[in-house]
Amino acid sequence: MKYLYYLLTLGALAVTAFHYAGEPFLPASALAAVVFAAVLVSLALFFLRRRPGIAHGVVWGFAVSGLAVELNTNMSHLLARAGLDWLGAAGYAPLIEEVLKFLGVLLICTCVIRPRSWLDYVFVGVAVGIGFTVGEDATAFARMTADNLDSDTAGAIGAVVIRLGSNPLSHSLFAGLSAYGLSQKQPVRWLIIAIAVHATKNLFPSLSTALDDAIWPLLAGMVVVLAEWVATIWGTIALRKKAAAHPPLSPAPAHA
């Protein structure tokens, strides 16, 4: 099973590399993506350094990020053919992305490490979310900067500000929920919850685009983002307290 995990990781990395090779990166957006990734990954590896499987989680999250974008693009075409294009990303991204991230948590916690408590599962989920955010935001930086060709530097800065405001830890929140469910032997229930929370975040921006003259989707979306920030901050504080009260005795051995 461990070899299956490595094979899937390499395959996903190959797809993601192909994906990024086709993105419209400008010097400013490329620099923004590299700096953003360096800061976020460094912070994750530092704060989660005592937990097993963190580096694997970050790599898996990044590996499936490009694959997710490619699958999302194909699903958007199918959604349009079904007359449901008004749903936008809410109609396909939550399912695709949460399943891919959950698969990584499952493989890492089954094939790579031996989790000793539910905290190990959740922290792997957080790491997967971090890696996924790095990849997804790189795509966002490239595309949002390309839309502002008159000043690629201003476009890149604007893209970073927008992505930071929408909560760069949201994918960690979603993946952490499904990882917790895996630790409680309730994976399907908590995966559905993660998908539902993710879909709620994506729904109102999609409705705002579909209903140009309506202001309520924009206001509702702002409320959802605020609630997500509150949940993320509360969850971070709670996890740090739990981790301090239950530190790992020693690094968890890998499966043979």
Image (cartoon, rainbow, N blue to C red):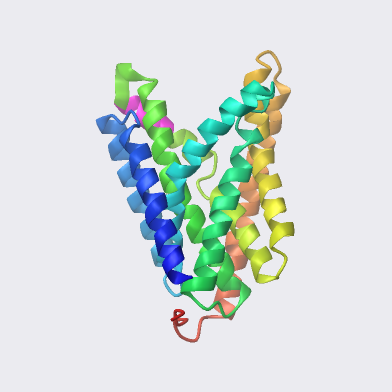
Q: Is residue 128 left or right of residue 145?
A: right
Q: Main secondary structure of the magenta part?
A: helix
Is residue 34 visible from the viewing direction of this image?
yes
- Residue furthest to the top in view is 213
Q: Viewer-proximal residue, 60 or 164?
A: 60
- Residue furthest to the bottom in view is 249
Residue at x 49% of width, y 57% of height:
128
Is residue 47 visible from the viewing direction of this image?
no
- Residue furthest to the left in view is 27
Q: Is residue 24 above or below residue 176?
A: above
Task: Give the number of marks.
Answer: 0
Residue 154 lies in the magenta stretch: yes
Q: How far across and down, in percent of the image, does residue 86 sit?
A: 67, 23
- The quarter of the rendered structure image containing the C terminus is bottom left
Q: Is residue 217 above or below residue 137?
A: above
Q: Viewer-proximal residue, 69 or 44?
A: 69
Q: How far across and down, in percent of the image, does residue 45 sit?
A: 40, 64
Q: Is residue 30 left or right of residue 109?
A: left
Residue at x 39% of width, y 66% of height:
46
Q: Quadrant of residue 117?
A: bottom right
Q: Quadrant of residue 245?
A: bottom right
Q: How far across and down, in percent of the image, does residue 226 sit?
A: 64, 42
Residue at x 54% of width, y 63% of height:
105
Q: Viewer-proximal residue, 193 or 222?
A: 193
Q: Is residue 216 above or below residue 3?
A: above
Q: Which residues are magenta?
A: 153-159
Q: Is residue 156 left or right of residue 123?
A: left
Residue 248 lies in the magenta stretch: no
